Amino acid sequence: METVNRGKIILGLELNLILFYVGVADNCIVSVSQLPELEVDYTQKVVTLSCSFSTVGCPAEQPTSLWFRYGTHESENLCSNGCKSETDKYTLKNLAQNRVSLTVNRLTFNDSAIYVCGIAFPNSKQPRAKQTGRGTVLVVREMKVLSKELQSALIALLVLFSIYITSVLVIFIILIKSKSNTRRKKETEESQKKKSARRIFQEIAQELYNKRHVETHQQTEKDNTYENRAALSNYERP
């Protein structure tokens, strides 16, 4: 970052010298503004850098627009010959409402650099009639760069998807617990039915046992009575 800032300072000095020689250094004041940064996908092949400016007290003539490229190891003055053809690497255009543009054709990774826009009124003697912008840092990416709107849409979709996943998990957990409670309740009911059936069977068995015991006891008493009578009858005989 320090290297880039130092480079911008050096570039600014060089640009001021170039702009000074474009016209002689009235009350004309120029202000130039540029986008600070622009990221693009290399598959676009073409990218346009815009530059807007405002003037106060300047001549009614069309100003001269200059573009400078500051790379990693060198700086260069672009389109000194005009660059009006789209077959050129760079194309300059004067747009309406105090705007100019520089189009970079056949975009490559090497086109990543700082592009500075300069506006000058050559016939003005005022030093501030020749100004440059702060420069636009052009970054050419390998991956496709998503727009802020698309990024916001993707974030919203991710949030909605997270809510959906959370809702599904909560419903799944509720269903599992409900199924488990239903199964436990069913097992409890079946166990109670089995216990009830077992108890009824035991009561029936006990009743049959008691009934049989009573019948056996009565039969035994009858047999004893009969034997006693027989013995008594034998005893009474002479």
Image (cartoon, grey):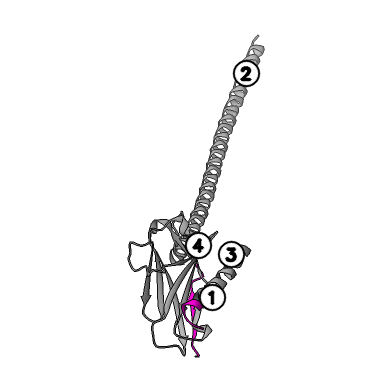
Between circles 2 and 1, the one closer to the viewer is 1
Q: In this picture, is 122 found above or below 177?
A: below
Q: In this picture, is 53 found above or below 231?
A: below
Mark 2 or mark 1: which comes first in sequence? 1
Between circles 1 and 4, the one closer to the viewer is 1
Q: Residues within 10 Å of mark 1 (few under 14, many from 20)?
A: some
The stretch of residues the image draws in magenta is 20-37
- C-alpha separation, residue under disc 2 versus residue under disc 4: 137 Å
Q: Which mark is residue 4?
A: 3
Mark 3 or mark 1: which comes first in sequence? 3
Q: Which mark is residue 229?
A: 2
Tag 2: amino acid: Arg
Mark 1 or mark 4: which comes first in sequence? 1
- C-alpha separation, residue under disc 3 versus residue under disc 4: 10 Å
**In percent of the image, x 48 and y 88: which residue is there?**
28
Between circles 3 and 1, the one closer to the viewer is 1
Read off the residue under disc 1: 16
Choose between 6 and 209: the one closer to the eye.
Answer: 6
- C-alpha separation, residue under disc 1 versus residue under disc 4: 20 Å
- C-alpha separation, residue under disc 2 versus residue under disc 1: 153 Å
